[in-house]
Image (cartoon, coloured by chain):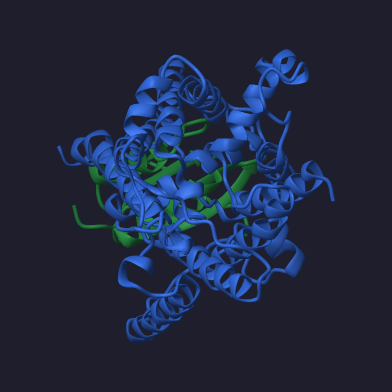
Amino acid sequence: MTETTITPTKTIDECGKICPYPDVDTMTTLKKMNKGEILEVLIDYPLSVERIPRSAQKNGHKVLSVTQVDGPTHSIIIEVLGLK
Amino acid sequence: MTPIVSGLLVGVLFGFALQRGRFCMNSAFRDIILGRDFTLFKALAAAILVSMIGFSIMAMTGIITLAPKPLMWGGNIVGGLLFGVGMVLAGGCASGITYRTGEGMMGAVMAVLGFGLSAMMGATGVLNPILKSLQNTKIMTADDKPLTLANIAGLDLKITMLALAILIIVIWVVLAMRNKSSEQSFGGKSKSLGEAIFKKGWNWLPTGIVVGLIGILSFPLSAAAGRNYPLGVTGGWVNIFQSLIKWQAVVEEKIKVTALNWEGAEVLGIVLGALVAALIAGEFAIRAPEPKILLQTLAGGLLMGFGAVVSSGCNIGHILSGVPQLSIGSIVGGLSIVAGGWTMAYFMFIRPMNA
């Protein structure tokens, strides 16, 4: 994937957190954001790297990318689309 | 094969599979009510069914003797509830915190320390009288056998296990074909087999099958080492802590404990296998949550360790190894773990999220 030019509206750092805080934080943040805004989640917990895109999609949002940043740390870019 | 080598071998395979499959029962159960995600629950169900078929065939061919745990309703219920509450606080079940120790997660390390300490306190320490009174609720069959779903209905255990597993699989396949859900995956589309095994997380079905197969492998190997039971975690940690703390009493034969037995080696293997898997996948890093959360995982571990010895089994001993043998004690213990977990998850995550 080429470098994205998308600038996130908001970034949350969930590195080091234990199960399921990264997921809960992401979902509560998405709920508070407006349609069309972009959320970036920085996360190093393998289970949530896979589960956050799944649940974001289930809630009607669009997952734009999941990229490895460094070691276990990933950046998940989500476009807010879901109904509130 | 010596018990240590055989235990380590099974443990390393198990730890590798747990890390690759992100297999954790705390998540498997909690995700059902938090986010309606059934991914890990399906992996768990697949693992139980594979083990159930394997155990029954091995029992029919005389390779193993089935060993369902007896029902001790007081211990099973109270211990299971404590364990369930504890695993939500700890952020992982007994096997979850064990494999995440290998990923370098300090929250899990704290939980393991709490788990070992309170399991020892229950098994041989100050909390033992409470454990004994709760476990003094044993109910056996008329001919003094552990209660199973088979013998309460007057059926043969091996055949019931096989028939039930096949029946559930058929129903599952039919239901799955009826409502096909499209599962989208992210990241690299075309991947080599090596990459799929060592770099990417496994899907739920291969995870479940591999975990089930490791359960099958563990039974005869553990039995050959004098412990007639498949995978376990609680007994392993108790053995490791006991060996470390009571070494002199062990060598002077004041207490009858094998310094590092099969299950202890298996648990060490889980940590090692997960470490190797995480290193290969580039998922290893020493990291810690904030201090308050570290205290929370320690408290969770303390509840889980005591709960597991009181219930005479953790999520692995009861749910992964006991449920396939249709033990009523393991079913009651397992359901209590789920009940404790759901209650705690509701108050910690679901209620605040909807507030």
Q: Which residue is drawn at 37% across and 50% down?
A: B329
* Residue B322 versus residue B310 in the image, above or below: below
The part of the image, by quadrant, that contains residue B55 is bottom right
Q: Residue at x 59, y 52 (%)?
A: B229
Between B303 and B218, the one lying in front of the other is: B218
Q: Is residue B321 left or right of residue B174?
A: right
Residue B172, given in percent of the width and then of the height, sits at 38, 78
Q: Which residue is drawn at 60% across and 57% down?
A: B201
Which chain is blue in the picture? B
What is the quadrant of the C terminus of chain B in the image? top left
Between B155 and B199, the one lying in front of the other is: B155
Residue B177, given in percent of the width and then of the height, sits at 39, 86
Q: In this view, does A69 lie to the left or right of A66?
A: right
The part of the image, by quadrant, that contains residue B59 is bottom right
Considering every residue shown, the one lying at the far right of the view is B1
Considering every residue shown, the one lying at the far front of the view is B143
Q: Can residue B322 be seen in this view?
A: yes
Colour of chain A as rendered? green
* Residue B120 versus residue B172 in the image, above or below: above
Residue B176, given in percent of the width and then of the height, sits at 38, 80
